[in-house]
Amino acid sequence: MGAGAPNPLYSEYSILNSLKMVPLLLFYAFSVLVQGYNAELTLHPKTQFLFPEGKSLVLPEPSDYFSSQLVSTPLPTNSFFQNFVLKNGDQPEYIQPYLIRSANSSISFSYPSQNISSDFIEQIFRPDLTISASKNPKPNQRHVISSYSDLSVTLDLPSSNLRFFLVRGSPYLTFAVNGNTSISISTADPIRKLSCDSSFTKYTIRLRNRQTWILYASAPIHLTDNVSTIKSGGFSGVIRIALLADSDSQFEKILDKCSLTYPVSGSAILGSFALKYKWDVKGAGKLLMLAHPLHLRLLSKADASVTVLEDVKYSSMDGELVGVIGDTWDLEAESIPVSWHSIKGLNKKSIPEIIRALGNDVKTLNASNISATSSYFYGKLVARAARLALIAEEVSYPKITPVVVQFLKDMIEPWLNGTFGANGFFYDKKWGGLVTKHGLNDTTGDFGFGIYNDHHFHLGYYIYGISVLTRFDPAWGKQYKSQAYSLVEDYTNLGPKENQHYTRLRCFDLWKLHSWAAGLTEFPFGRNQESTSEAINAYYSAALMGSAYGDADLVSLGSTLAAFEIQSAQTWWHVKGDNKIYAPRFVKNNKVVGILWSRKRDSILWFAPAERKDIRLGIQVLPILPITEVVFSDVDYVKELVKWALTSVPKNRTEEGWKGFVYALEAIYKQKQALNEVRDLSSHDDGNSLSNLLWWIHSRK
């Protein structure tokens, strides 16, 4: 019998559930065959469960910025425009390729330069151009979000008669002017020259800082300039402004040719390992957009409806943004395996050692001894125990399964039925989502869960535990199915047709193709995310839950989001030696990003300095799962990363918790050495175990 082959000693749990998976897998394969590779994902309606309503004392008021028709619906809490609806709404957001700021009934935009050091890269906001109405009776009136979508947000300045269509990836800033309004454009640098064509619909604005901006108007407009201000007469129509990022005449001709076609919004349609962008376009002609590096890799080679313009480039901290002609794009992600067990199977000779470790780890399981009340740390303990059950199943050691199953029930049920007195889940109607008891009155409670921070991190651990428990006890899974779906749909809901109580994909950004974790906190550098591996775990666990419940749509959705998250991690968090996205100075000093912000890359962590490279590695690895093998499939990069991290591994035995993650990656290319190092560890991170480390190392082949 080969390593990883089915073992006749598998428990009855394993046999029963394996048989149940056969029709599910056949159904899933048939669905893809019939509906097509790009079939839109939709989750079937289910009986919707709501946790008890909680009254938060710390959440901001959405009606300050969202229009009245939007306030009655669940609202985004980790979006690319989140700063626009928090506090004064005047912190910039990065809407590629420009930084955009709304303040005092005006919109400022910047083609940002970068401040680069060996420890961080950050964009510098300097208001290159600021647009407002010349005469505004209410200059301090706040803007209003009148609509938003996956790829855009529409921002109104009511007292100025201006509406801005802020569409991600558009090289033009596009806005509508109503009511024969006179507009004002102020510049941070003096104007060197303002010129126009004979039709008065195209103006060239040359600044002293060597920037050149092109303004296009849908009707003749008369502009005059004075030092650093441009004024217009009364105007009604659409204005588009684009930076001439290259002085080549062909570049300007392309901007001219595509200036009449503008997007007012954009949607993203998920398929099985696929994503389609579709823009709502006005005007005649062809739509010009910009693609970031991951877009370019994923654009379908078979899609003849788009044309990549290699010579149209804008700089960005996400890498060069390249021109693409086309109002629909088809992106294809690399498919990933979603497996309960190791992808390549275990070395048979290793099984006795793993079983001994399992026996010791299971002895520590006692729900009555758990002191953790934080939704995050509690969830990690749940997932840690669930791993033991799956490892035991893989090594055919059913003896411990009942103990783990009972522990999981004792740990999870109080959170699902509301009897965990120290904490619990509640439903917030104001924004539409889950909060915790700790977070109702404290913005820092449960690491900000109550203000929608880290939802996918926390809930992913519970979903993993629920998935495993449902696999081993389907009757239990059926009993708590509605609560389980209420948890998973908090961050995987596709829209009101699936669940009217939650916003669409709370954490996942369908343009950047990864998640954000910052919640409803205003940050100067926009949204951020630290741990990509915990984000991957959230979607991987959702796929496992679909598998446990026989829900092929959830399997597909979770797998697809995990695949995009993995490729984003490899693109923007994993810093290889030949990295061309970041500046050489940053690349030389960093092998992995600590915190990735919308407009900053940082080497520090929220809880550790940049010098603790072992922790920085660990937070991008935990929890160790079968899918981890896909995340770190580039062996050459893993060697670079481990060599870099080993220089900061502490020598004292009191700080060994993070060492296990370094050794786990080392096992990819130095299995025996890593095995000896892991055996010598005296402690492990609270989400890890010796059993799990041994399982991982012995599944390297």
Image (tube, rainbow, N blue to C red):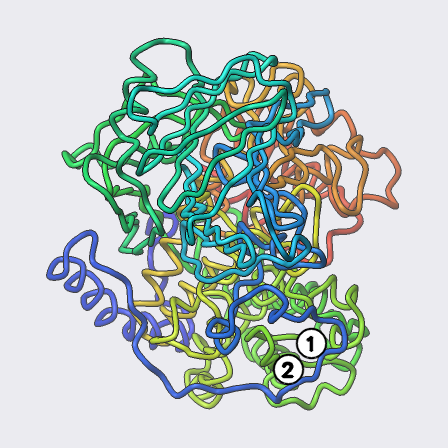
Choose between 229 and 443: the one closer to the eye. 229
Residue type at numbered disc 2: Phe
Q: Residue at x 88, y 38 (%)?
A: 652
Which image quadrant for residue 121?
A: top right
Callout 1 crowding tier (Cα within 10 Å): few <14, some 14–19, many ≥20: many
Residues tagged 1 and 2 counted as in contact (Cβ below 8 A):
yes
Name the element at disc 1: strand
Q: Residue at x 59, y 47 (%)?
A: 135
Q: Residue 403: x percent and y percent?
A: 61, 78
**Type of amino acid under label 1:** Thr
Q: Is residue 557 above or below residue 230?
A: below
Q: Residue at x 67, y 29 (%)?
A: 124
Residue 104 placement (x, y as % from top left): 67, 49
Q: Earlier in the sequence, mark 1 or mark 2?
A: 2
Q: Is residue 354 left or right of residue 501?
A: right
Viewport quadrant of the C terminus: top left
Q: Which residue is mark 1?
A: 436
Q: Nearer the viewer, residue 305 or 423?
A: 305
Count all numbered tags in the image, as a single digit: 2
Specify the quadrant of the image occupied by residue 214: top left
Label 2, secondary structure: give it. Answer: strand
Crowding at mark 2 (Cα within 10 Å: few <14, some 14-19, many 20+): many
One can see residue 205 in this view: yes
**Image location of residue 291, percent across then percent down:** 37, 33
Q: CA distance from mark 1 to mark 2?
A: 6 Å
Name the residue nearer the viewer: 489 or 502: 502
Q: Which mark is residue 621?
A: none
Residue 538 in the image, given as x and y percentages of width and height: 52, 59
What residue does disc 2 label? 426
Q: Residue furthest front?
A: 233
Q: Farthest residue toward the top?
A: 248
